[in-house]
Image (cartoon, rainbow, N blue to C red):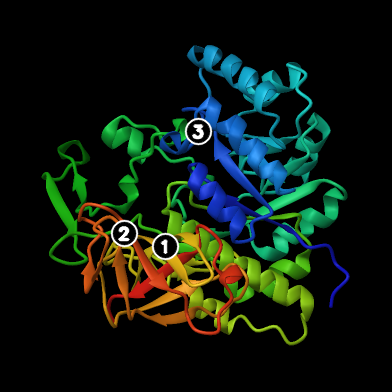
Amino acid sequence: MTSMKKPELLAPAGNFEKLKIALLYGADAVYVGAPALGLRAKAGFSAEDLVEAVEYTHRLGKKIYLTLNLFAKDADQARLDYFIEISQKVKADGLIIADPGVFDYIKSAGLDIPLHISTQANVSSANTAKFWKNQGASLCVLARELSIKEAADIKRAVGDFGIEIFIHGAMCMAMSGRCLISAYTDSRSGNRGACNHACRKSYSTKLVVTENEGREVEPFDLFEDEDGSYLFNSKDLCLMPVLNEVLAAGFDSLKIEGRNKSLYYVGAVTRIYRQAIDQWFANPTTWSADAFVAEVATLQNRGYTLGFAHGFAGKSAQTYDSTESTSQYRTAGFIREVTESHFTLEIKHKLRINDVIEILSPHQFEPIRYTITEIYDIDRDTLVNEKNPGQTGWAVRMPLPNNVSPTLFPVYTLTRIRVKE
């Protein structure tokens, strides 16, 4: 067992249910969006939800951070004042900010809340981190474009100043996410919470030489396949293969991207990293990433990359032939109630007698394989051979697996089903 301090595992929470699942599966903290103010405008909480979310998180002895990482215009002044009002009311554990002017304005309001610097601020050096430390920030989320070594050097240089890095999730092809493609193609700014993920679309790329250069107008097509190319489509970041290096570097917080991801994704990815971190700290000399790498491969992904973890990734970080996010598994459902003999499942996928589902307990790493022998349709008050989530009513009841304690299945426990080889 190592004597190092465990880093905070920070998970995304796009709504209250996702927050509950992230905390259930081992997140030490969550980050959430203020009402229509963060970089995931669709993943914001209402003011009432925020108050309840903070109280819920604090009851569990965990932390919650509020994002305000937009780049503000003068017209946003009323929104900033509203954010200050909300922040005073909800008592979050930190505010995540990208814009220096916003930082200064929030700081001048005298809020007794730690201020964190977003990855959108592109903190790429010890000098920049020290600058923010001197301005009164308590933590910087480093730019994704740094290697583990570069980030570790910054951590050593800044002393008792918090350093956070991303370890998993979708990657933006632009420098620290500061992209204008969405604004150009659809008048939706990725820097103001409205990115339309234009980088994931198929493009036909042409070089056009104009007449005033002394040549005829002539397009030069760049072909990948008959459907176009995906020149801007980054693979997803996954540092699980080198998590031992990340943990040995001594960062303060490890962040998972994905406030717009599904309930299942948030819980499953948090569960994997929680188990991996705990096992490394229990015995770093014998720790292996293999089982955890295999498990993250079951999640929806566009292919995985280490990003800049070992230096410039080059073409290996991009997926040029498809933008599809794939997985062999789908969400079977969420456990909503447990008794000594049965559990109630909110189904999300068609289930039949003899189907095999896997139950992902928050309390153990190995999934519990469960063959369905009985499906009781609660709404119809009868046993059925199959149940489709599209039918009226979502609840089914099934017998608990043999020799398994119901304490392994708290409310919101995830289940999954394999759908293809």
Q: Residue at x 75, y 17 (%)?
A: 108
Residue type, mark 1 in image: Thr
Q: Along the line of sight, which residue is nearer the eye, 213 or 155?
A: 155
Q: Along the line of sight, which residue is nearer the eye, 18 or 256?
A: 18
Closer mark to the observer between disc 1 and disc 2: 2
Distance of label 3 from label 1 (alpha carbons): 28 Å
Q: Position of residue 189 (x, y in %)?
A: 39, 32
Task: Kindly indicate whether the residue at mark 2 contacts the one at mark 1 (C-beta within 8 angstroms).
Answer: yes
In this rendering, position of residue 118 left or right of residue 5? left
Question: What residue would you read off at disc 3?
Answer: 45
- Dot 3 or dot 1, earlier in sequence: 3
Question: Which quarter of the picture shows residue 215?
Answer: top left
Q: Residues within 10 Å of mark 2 (few under 14, many from 20)?
A: some
Q: Position of residue 175 (x, y in %)?
A: 51, 47
Q: Residues within 10 Å of mark 1 (few under 14, many from 20)?
A: many
Distance of label 1 from label 2 (alpha carbons): 9 Å
Q: Position of residue 35 (x, y in %)?
A: 50, 27
Q: In the rendered view, tell whether residue 53 sits above or below residue 3.
A: above
Q: Residue at x 31, y 34 (%)?
A: 184
Give me the disc on residue 66. Answer: none
Task: Kindly indicate whether the residue at mark 1 contacts the one at mark 3 (C-beta within 8 angstroms).
Answer: no
Question: Which quarter of the picture shows residue 93?
Answer: top right
Question: What residue would you read off at disc 1?
Answer: 344
Q: Along the line of sight, which residue is nearer the eye, 48 or 103?
A: 48
In terms of secondary structure, where does tag 1 sit? strand
Question: What residue would you read off at disc 2?
Answer: 378
Closer mark to the observer between disc 3 and disc 2: 2
Q: Residue at x 82, y 46 (%)?
A: 161
